[in-house]
Amino acid sequence: MSEKISGDLHIANEVLSDVIGHAVTQCYGVVGMTSPTRAGSIAKLLPATRLRRGVVVDTSENGVVVDLYVIIEYGTNINVVSQNVVDAVTFAINEYIQVPLDSVNVHVEGVKVRR
């Protein structure tokens, strides 16, 4: 089907959050996602069914801005894991959603021993 159809495609932020959340949880060293902490409270690990709460998607003039709130496995290199998360999210957005990506910000909310 090579025929071009005119129109606009709108993708909900919830769909972006689901794709991003799945990509993040597949990264080595990520134990889970957390809700963004507002008042410096303790990070709470979210169940796998609520991963989109650890993802904040916004838009800018240049594209989509993604903020991720993650818990990293104890003993892993935080910088390497964070870069892997950025790479995985960038790949998922470019490959599956195909929308312009402005930035991916990883906020490490805690470190936890994997059981």
Image (cartoon, rainbow, N blue to C red):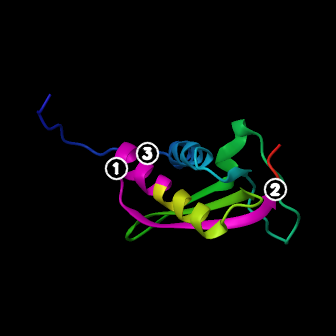
Q: Nearer the viewer, mark 2 or mark 3?
A: 2
Between the residue at mark 3 and the residue at mark 1, the CA separation in whole angstroms equals 10 Å
Mark 1: amino acid:
Gln
Quadrant in the picture for residue 26? top right
**CB under 8 Å between discs 3 and 1:** no
Mark 3: amino acid:
Ile
Residue range of the region highlighted in magenta in the rendering = 88-112
Between the residue at mark 2 and the residue at mark 3, the CA separation in whole angstroms equals 34 Å
Chain-order first, disc 1 or disc 2: 1
> Which of the two residues, 33 or 98, is positioned nearer the viewer here?
33
Task: Name the residue: 66% across, 66% down.
Answer: 77
**Residue 105 image offset from top left, x and y in percent:** 57, 68
Q: Secondary structure at mark 3?
A: loop
Q: Residues within 10 Å of mark 2 (few under 14, many from 20)?
A: some
Question: Which residue is under mark 2?
Answer: 112
Chain-order first, disc 3 or disc 1: 3
Question: Which residue is under mark 1?
Answer: 98
